[in-house]
Image (cartoon, helix red, strand yellow):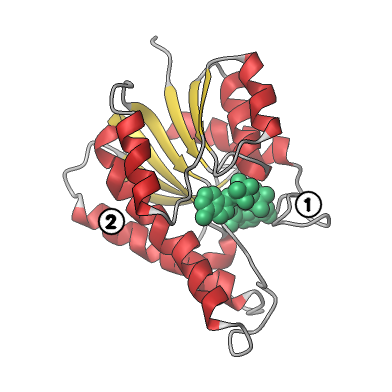
Amino acid sequence: MSTQRVLVVGASRGLGLGLVARFLERNWDVTATVRRPSAGLTDLAARGHLRIQAGVDINDDEAVTALRVALADAPDFDIVFVVVGVATQAGTPIAALPRSVAGMMFETNAISPIRFAEAFQKRVAPGGLIVLMTSKLGSVSLNRGGGWGSYRASKAALNTLARSFVGQHAKAHWGVVLMHPGWVRTDLGGRRATLDVETSARGIVTVLEGHLGRSGYVFLDYAGETVPW
Ligand SMILES: NC(=O)c1ccc[n+]([C@@H]2O[C@H](COP(=O)([O-])OP(=O)(O)OC[C@H]3O[C@@H](n4cnc5c(N)ncnc54)[C@H](OP(=O)(O)O)[C@@H]3O)[C@@H](O)[C@H]2O)c1
């Protein structure tokens, strides 16, 4: 079997960095993007087939276009995985949150991942996957407590935009996975989270390897369980 290829978008730290390590462990050929050089990612480059593309801010259309140009001669990807996400002042109720912060969260978590997926969908190999890191907090039906309202809404928007994206590409030869990584100890997840990065990332890679070749869309967690919309 030929080497499988993944593009990991947002790999400087946290889950993105952990996913790069796990894909390398599984002998995938990895291309990873960051905004700024990351020591953790540079260290991983010594371990296997890893190409690093810096300067990729997902909210910057010109940077995304430059990435597409830089990767034009590379073979297509079996997985394009947008990991990027923010939870800036997520605990602040929406009425008290500066509009600029709410807008930036919506742009980074919902609009830009879909624009990135659109920009790279032609670079997904037949039977491949576009994976968007979402959250169980983006599930509308599971929202009982309501906390982290702006973050929840941005991920709910991502889920809805992803379903529309699939609808707009009905004949696509790829599928879309909306992935909930669990509650993970990262800068975003905090120290009280129940999972370490390695456990979550290893689970995600296993789930995705088992999902290759399927079209349509699914909302799954790192253990392969379906998450209600
Ligand atoms: N941790 C959890 O418990 C949890 C649970 C559910 C879902 N998630 C989701 O999982 C994903 C990764 O989260 P994490 O916990 O690993 O968070 P993290 O440690 O805070 O990492 C966030 C990543 O996103 C990148 N990023 C932020 N804004 C960006 C932009 N405009 N352009 C490019 N990259 C940008 C960061 O890059 P810089 O280093 O340049 O800032 C960093 O690599 C997010 O989508 C998050 O919503 C996490």
**In the rendered structure, which amino acid carries the disc numbered 1?**
Thr
Residue 128 seen in the current view: yes
Callout 2: CB less than 8 Å from ligand 1: no
Residue at point 64% right, 74% down? 148
Above-or-below relation of 57 to 29:
below
Q: Which of marks 1 and 2 is in front?
A: 2
The percent position of residue 178, horizontal first and vertical second, equals 45, 51
**In the rendered structure, which amino acid carries the disc numbered 2?**
Phe
Residue at point 41% right, 37% down? 80
Q: Quadrant of residue 15?
A: top right
Quarter occupied by the N terminus: top left
The percent position of residue 7, horizontal first and vertical second, equals 44, 33
Callout 1: CB less than 8 Å from ligand 1: no
Q: List the residue tagged with mark 2.
A: 165
Q: Residue 194 carries which label?
A: 1
Numbered disc 1: secondary structure: loop
Say few, some or many: other residues with alpha carbon within 10 Å of mark 2 (under 14 / 14 to 19 / 20 or more).
Answer: some
Above-or-below relation of 178 to 146:
above
In the shown orientation, is residue 89 left or right of residue 3? Answer: right
Q: How far apart are marks 1 and 2 (CA)?
A: 32 Å
Earlier in the chain: of badge 1 and badge 2, it is 2
The percent position of residue 13, horizontal first and vertical second, equals 67, 42
The residue most toward the right is 192
